[in-house]
Image (spheres, rainbow, N blue to C red):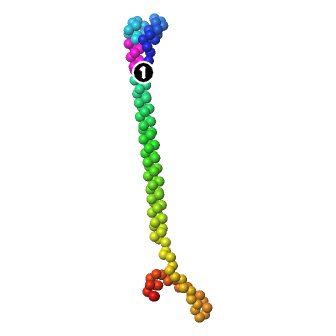
Amino acid sequence: MATDRQLVREFQSIGKDDLGYQGQTLTEFIERSLSENKQQVALEQEKAEEKELELARIQAEEKAREREHTLAMERLRLEAEFRRGEEANERPEPQVGVWKTDVPYKSPCRCLMTREKLSTTF
C-alpha cells in the first residue's frame, strides 16, 4: 500500500496530459488511489481465503481417503480372518485309527474308523 508521500510524488510526476488523472486535485487523486489500494487489498484477501478454503478441502479429501483406506484394510483383515476360521471348520477331522489286517490270501486291508465307529465298537 502506498504512503501519502509516495502518492504525492506520483501525483506530481503525472503529466497533465495523462487522461486518467487529468483535472484532479491532490485530494481527489489520493482518495482515488486509496480506494484502488483498498480494492486491491480486498481482492488479495479474497484470493488468500479461496486458497485457504481449497487447501482445507484438499486436506479433508486426503483425510477421507486415508479413512477409507484404513477401513478397507481392516475389512480385508477381518475377511481373511473369517476365511481362515471357515477353512478350519471345513477341514476333515483327523483320522482316529487306521487298522491294517492281513486276510488269509495276504492282501492288506485298511479299515479307517471314525470316532463314532470306535465308540460303538468298544
- Main SS class of the magenta portion in the image: helix
**Residue 37, placed above or below residue 8:** below
Residue 74 position by quadrant? bottom left
**Residue 12, placed above or below residue 86:** above
User: Which quadrant does the C terminus fall into?
Assistant: bottom left
**Residue 24, placed above or below residue 109:** above
Please tell me how crowded label 1 is: few (under 14), some (14-19), or many (20+) other residues with Cα within 10 Å. Answer: few
Q: Amino acid at mark 1?
A: Gln
Question: In the depicted view, which residue is nearer to us: 47 or 74?
Answer: 74
Q: Which residues are magenta?
A: 31-41
Q: Residue tagged by mark 1?
A: 40
For the point 40% across and 27% down, which residue is it? 46
User: Which quadrant does the N terminus fall into?
Assistant: top left
Which residue occupies the extreme front position in the image? 122
**Residue 93, placed above or below residue 54:** below
Residue 3 position by quadrant? top left
Can residue 17 be spotted in the picture? no
Which residue occupies the extreme right position in the image? 106
